[in-house]
Image (cartoon, helix red, strand yellow):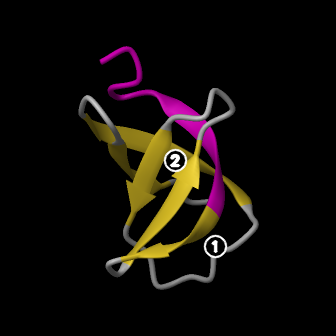
Amino acid sequence: RAYQDQTVDILFEGLNKGRWRGRTTTNKLVFVESDQNLLGKIVPVSITWTGPWSMQGRLLER
C-alpha cells in the first residue's frame, strides 16, 4: 500500500495478457494498459491499485 497513489518510474519488460508488464527500481511488478510500445522504456506511472504480488497503474502524460 505504500505505493498507492504514488508516481514511480517503471522499466517495461513485455506484454502479459494484453497489458504491459514492468518493474519499479525496487523490483515490484506493475501492470499498465496502453497501446504504445513500451518495451525497454522507463516511464512514469501513477499507481492505482496495489496487491500482495503486483500493482496496476496508468501512464502519465509527458
Mark 1 crowdedness (10 Å alpha carbons): few <14, some 14-19, many ≥20: some
Q: Secondary structure at mark 2?
A: strand
Q: Is residue 8 left or right of residue 42?
A: left
**Residue at figure coordinates x 44%, y 42% from the top left:** 46
Q: Is residue 46 left or right of residue 13?
A: left
The residue range painted magenta reads: 1-12
Mark 2 crowdedness (10 Å alpha carbons): few <14, some 14-19, many ≥20: many
Q: Amino acid at mark 1?
A: Leu
**Measured along the vertical axis of the image, is residue 45 above or below residue 20?**
above
Label at residue 51: none
Q: Quadrant of residue 51?
A: top left
Q: Amino acid at mark 2?
A: Val
Residue 36 at x, y percent in the picture: 56, 82
Q: Quadrant of the N terminus?
A: top left
Q: Quadrant of the C terminus?
A: bottom right
Q: Mark 2 — residue?
A: 45
Tell me the mark number nearer the camera, choosing from 2 and 1.
1
Q: Is residue 9 magenta?
A: yes
Q: Mark 1 — residue?
A: 38
Observer-nearest of 32 and 21: 21
**Measured along the vertical axis of the image, is residue 44 above or below residue 17?**
above
Q: Earlier in the sequence, mark 2 or mark 1?
A: 1
**Measured along the vertical axis of the image, is residue 9 above or below residue 58?**
above
* Residue reaching furthest to the top: 2
Observer-nearest of 60 and 31: 31
CB atoms of marks 2 and 1 within 8 Å: no
Q: Secondary structure at mark 1?
A: loop
Q: Quadrant of residue 8?
A: top right
**Residue at figure coordinates x 47%, y 44% from the top left:** 29
* Residue reaching furthest to the front: 53
**Measured along the vertical axis of the image, is residue 4 above or below residue 14?**
above
Q: Is residue 26 magenta?
A: no
